[in-house]
Amino acid sequence: MLYTIAAVLIILWLLGVVTSYTLGGFIHILLVIAIIVVLLRVIRA
């Protein structure tokens, strides 16, 4: 479940970078959230 959420957030961030369409810092906030989710998953495993 957490990996799915992280993957979706990373894909959204990459789309934002590739298309140069960023909603302020929103895309970068998504990236930070995705990294935090992955780290929490690794720590708990």
Image (cartoon, helix red, strand yellow):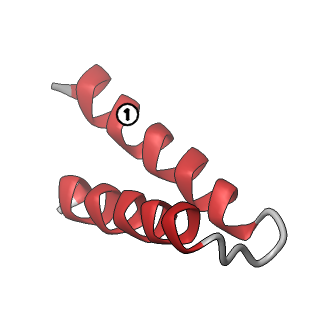
Residue 18 left/right relative to 44:
right
Q: Residue furthest right?
A: 24
Q: Quadrant of residue 29?
A: bottom right
Q: What is the crowding at mark 1: few (fewer than 14 residues within 10 Å), some, or many (at least 20)? A: few
> What residue is shown at x 55% (from left), y 74% (from top)?
19
> What residue is shown at x 64% (from left), y 65% (from top)?
27
**Tag 1 residue:** 40
Residue 41 left/right relative to 33:
left
> What residue is shown at x 37% (from left), y 33% (from top)?
40
Indicate the position of residue 24 as horizontal and vertical percent values. 84, 70
Indicate the position of residue 21 as horizontal and vertical percent values. 66, 78
Q: Is residue 25 above or below residue 40?
A: below
Front-most of residues 2 and 25: 25
Q: Quadrant of residue 11?
A: bottom left
Q: Quadrant of residue 16?
A: bottom right
Q: Quadrant of the N terminus?
A: bottom left
| Number of numbered markers | 1
Q: Is residue 9 above or below residue 40?
A: below
The disc labelled 1 sits on which kind of residue? Leu
Front-most of residues 38 and 7: 7
Q: Quadrant of the C terminus?
A: top left
Indicate the position of residue 6 as horizontal and vertical percent values. 33, 56
> What residue is shown at x 25% (from left), y 26% (from top)?
42
Secondary structure at badge 1 equals helix
Q: Is residue 41 above or below residue 22?
A: above
Front-most of residues 39 and 15: 15
